[in-house]
Every structure is written in C-alpha cells, then in structure tokens.
Image: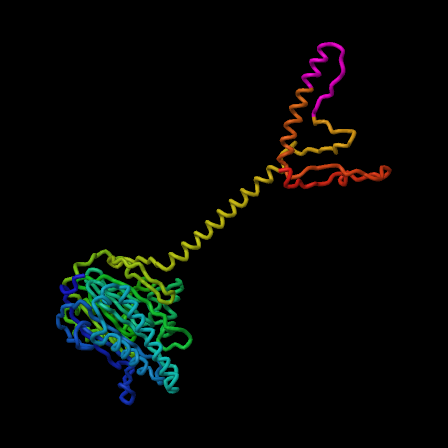
C-alpha cells in the first residue's frame, strides 16, 4: 500500500441553513463534523481547504454527525458523537498497523460508534432535559487506495468520478430505505417521501443497541468523496431522474453540480449550498469533500456493484478482498456453524445407516428357513425322525437291501447337518409333557423355549 504517493485535497463546511435561529444554541445548527488530514501527525482535526496533501501511512479521516431531537438537545448528541471521534482519533492513537487493513479500520470505527451511543444514552439518563436526543454518525477513513466507511443513521457518503458519475457508498438506515429494499418503493420514490425522516438506527436510541454498518471501496484518481447530512441529500436528488412517464424530475442534482464545479472544491461546496437553498432547504447542511488528485490509478469506466458491506448487527467478519467496487461478501463466522451443522447431519445419517445395517443381520439369521430343530426327550419312546427322511421298506431282494443302505446313509448325513445347525442356535425347543392326558393342550402351549447354558457353547 503505497500511501505516500497519493495526493488529495479537501474542504468541509457546516451551516444551520434551513434551521437557522439566532436565539438557539449554535444558531440552531445540530450538525457536527470532524476532519483530520493526517492521522500520523501531532495536530488534531486539521484541514486546509483545497490544499494538496500527501497521504500519510496512517491515512486521513472524515466524519459527519447529524443531531436529532429538536428541543431535546440534538446539538448535544451530535457534539458527544464529535467528541468521541476526536478522542479515538487523537494524535498518537492511530498506528500504521491499525490503519493497515479494512478489518482493523472498520472494527475501530464501529467501536467509536458504539461508544458514542453509550455516552449519549448515559447523558440523557443523567439529564432529563436531554431525553429523546440522538444523532447519526458516518465516518470515512482513507488509507492508501482503500476507503473504509462506517455509519449509523441516514447521513450519506457518495463518490463522484468523471467516468462513472455519482454513486452512493452508504445505505440509509431509514424506514423508506427498507421499503425500497423490499421493492415496495423505488430509490427515486424515497425522495420527498412523507416518512423519509424516520430513521431505524441511530445513536441514543433506547429501544436498541447501536448497530453500525461498514463498507470497503477502492479509490481512483479523479474520485471526489462526499460526506453529508440529510439537509443536503434530502433536498437535492443524486442525479437526473425521470418519473414513470419518462418526464425528468425538476430541480438540480448533486452529480451535475459536482461535475460542473470539480476544478475547485471550495466552489463546489458553495454551489451545493446555493442549490440546497434554492430547493428550500429545511434542515442543517453539512458536507465534506475530498478529491483524489493522483497516485491511486485510473478507474474502470464500466459501472460495477459498489462496496463490500458488513453489518455489526450480525457481528460478522468479512473475508476482505479488495476489488474495484465489486461486492464480495464472505462471512467467515458463518462458515464454522454451517460446516459443523453439515458434519453433524452427515454423522447422524451415517450412524443411522450403520445401526440399521447391524440390526438386519440377526433378523436374517433368525428368519432363515428350515433351521429350527424340534427334539424329543431321550426317554421318549417315539424319537423324532429327521424331516424329509424317506421311509425304508423291508425287502428280501438285493436291490431292496442296497436301497435301504443308501437311504440310511442319506439319513445319517442329514442328521449330521441338522446336529451342526442345532449347535449354532441360542436355544432349543422341547415339548411339554401333559400330566393329564384327558385334557387337550393348546398347540401354542406344547412348546417352550429352553435357553442353552454356557456349558453347551
């Protein structure tokens, strides 16, 4: 990551704008921003507008916080978020090792978001006049050719490139965005929607823990990164768009304004302000612009899906592979439980098949035909004859004698085979002698099982 070769320039501004009130704190401005063009030096929150800067090994940071709550101290909430960011990115806190990977950067920024959420809730708990306050927070950390973004709420990040136009880098945590994700609304229909101000995630929300989201992008020469509050994105469309009948929506758009004023970021910021005011801005407006001048390489003009998303709500670590805006979502932690579940299923199926196979062997042995020998007691006068033994008739001639000898030999062989079979059985069947010969004994009671003892084995 050759960060020393990347040259960039920046500009940032915040204004009460549509909420200007000379009698309110900060003239009614509930927004805050934080910028540090060099995280490796000893100067905190430093920026010089439109000055070309060489990117350090630790990179640079941009952050925007949009306070909410109106009379319930929205400016206090955004200030707490700002101070938390300033504390975590104070001189000496960021090391080259921490800035080296997107995984490290996104985890660190998400920790900042969770800590800001904890502090805002604690302040509201101690000061009842602050109850109900909240804030959004979006941060962008540029390190080498990688841009890591973490956010909560509906403050946005965009990227403009002359070859690609404007593309959103973040996704609003809002009610109308959820409707768009479900296909109920189109992205264009979310603009000017009457419920567009309802956020589903924010700092200070007592109904849930902070759930930040992160994405990774690769930057290129000519890229202009824009971070802004919804005071800007809520009154200016992203780019030219048409309604269902093909008619262009009226008004100016962010893409055209940046394209026409990209020679100077200060002029670009002023043009955005003027356009927002002409669009009857109704909220505070905050914007940070950062242009990659050189050192990052040219971009591919073919538009591709942007970003590599992560969501800390699921506490997922992403297998990070940096492609030019290509989404590759490989959650490592999901691999382990899924793999273990598959192994468990395979083991259960294998054990079931093995158990069934083993149980089939004795069934076949016990149900083998013609293996049961019924033996009579030795003291019985009528000794059972072998099954299928042919009766031998007395004869006076030689042929009859030979036939008798052959039959006796055959019967002897069968007796030997049956005796061997009898030795393999775990029991033998013997008839029960009836003491009262006058009574008829049921056929099922005439036989009983006599287990063979160990001495017969």
Instruction: Determine the residue located farthest toward the right in the rendered image.
Output: 438
Depth check, front residue: 434 or 236: 434
> Residue 123: horizontal and vertical position, in percent?
35, 83
Q: Residue furthest bottom?
A: 23
Q: Position of residue 405 (x, y in %)?
A: 69, 16
Q: Residue at x 64, y 37 (%)?
A: 456
Q: Which color scheme did the rendering employ for the protein?
A: rainbow
Q: What's the magenta region?
A: 388-407
- Quick one: which residue is furthest to the front in this view? 455
Q: Is residue 372 above or below residue 28?
A: above
Foreground of the two, 440 or 386: 386
- Relative placement, left or right, of 157 versus 376 is left
Q: Is residue 234 visible?
A: no
Q: Position of residue 264 (x, y in %)?
A: 14, 71
Q: Residue 427, relative to residue 18: is it above or below?
A: above
The x and y percentages for residue 329 are 33, 58
In this rendering, position of residue 357 left or right of residue 63:
right
- Report the number of discs: 0
Point 30% across, 61% down: residue: 308
Quarter assignment of residue 274: bottom left
Q: Examine the rendering and report whether any part of residue 105 can be seen.
A: yes
**Which corner quadrant holds the C terminus?**
top right
| Quadrant in which residue 325 is drawn | bottom left
Nearer-the-camera pick, 309 or 221 = 309
| Residue 56 within the magenta-colored segment of the rendering | no
Q: Nearer the viewer, residue 167 or 377?
A: 377
**Residue 23 occupies quadrant:** bottom left
Quadrant assignment for the N terminus: bottom left
């Amino acid at each position: 990551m050759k960060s020393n070769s990347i040259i960039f320039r920046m500009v940032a501004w915040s204004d009460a704008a549509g909420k200007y009130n000379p009698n309110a704190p900060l003239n009614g401005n509930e927004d805050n921003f934080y910028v540090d063009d060099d995280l490796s030096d000893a100067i905190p929150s430093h920026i010089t507008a439109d000055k070309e800067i060489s990117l350090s090994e630790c990179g640079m940071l941009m952050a925007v916080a949009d306070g909410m709550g109106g009379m319930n101290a929205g400016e206090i909430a955004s200030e707490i978020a700002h101070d938390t960011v300033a504390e975590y990115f104070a001189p000496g806190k960021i090391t080259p090792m921490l800035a080296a990977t997107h995984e490290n950067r996104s985890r660190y920024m998400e920790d900042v978001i969770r800590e800001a959420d904890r502090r805002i809730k604690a302040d509201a708990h101690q000061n009842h006049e602050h109850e109900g306050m909240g804030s959004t927070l979006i941060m962008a950390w540029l390190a080498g050719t990688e841009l890591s973004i973490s956010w909560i709420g509906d403050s946005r990040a965009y990227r403009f490139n002359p070859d690609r136009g404007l593309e959103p880098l973040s996704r609003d945590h809002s009610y109308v965005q959820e409707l768009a994700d479900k296909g109920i609304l189109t992205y264009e229909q979310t603009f000017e929607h009457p419920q567009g101000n309802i956020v589903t995630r924010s700092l200070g929300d007592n109904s849930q823990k902070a759930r930040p989201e992160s994405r990774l992008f690769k930057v290129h020469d000519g890229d202009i990164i824009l971070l802004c509050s919804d005071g800007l994105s809520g009154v200016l469309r992203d780019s030219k768009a048409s309604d269902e009948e093909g008619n262009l929506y009226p008004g100016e758009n962010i893409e055209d304004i940046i394209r026409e004023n990209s020679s100077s970021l200060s002029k670009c910021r002023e043009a955005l302000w003027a356009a927002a005011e002409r669009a009857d801005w109704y909220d505070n407006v905050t914007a940070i612009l950062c242009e990659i001048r050189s050192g990052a390489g040219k971009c591919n003009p073919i538009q591709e899906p942007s970003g590599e998303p992560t969501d800390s709500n699921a506490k997922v670590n992403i297998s990070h592979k940096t492609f030019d805006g290509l989404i590759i979502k490989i959650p490592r932690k999901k691999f382990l439980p899924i793999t273990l579940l598959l192994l468990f299923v395979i083991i259960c199926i294998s054990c079931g098949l093995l158990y069934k196979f083993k149980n089939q062997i004795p069934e076949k042995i016990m149900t083998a035909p013609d293996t049961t020998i019924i033996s009579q007691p030795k003291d019985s006068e009528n000794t059972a004859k072998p099954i299928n033994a042919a009766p031998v008739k007395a004869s006076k001639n030689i042929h009859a004698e030979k036939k008798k000898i052959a039959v006796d030999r055959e019967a002897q062989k069968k007796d030997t085979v049956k005796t061997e079979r009898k030795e393999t059985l775990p029991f033998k069947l013997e008839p029960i002698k009836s003491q009262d010969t006058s009574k008829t004994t049921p056929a099922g009671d005439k036989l009983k099982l006599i287990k063979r003892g160990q001495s017969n084995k």
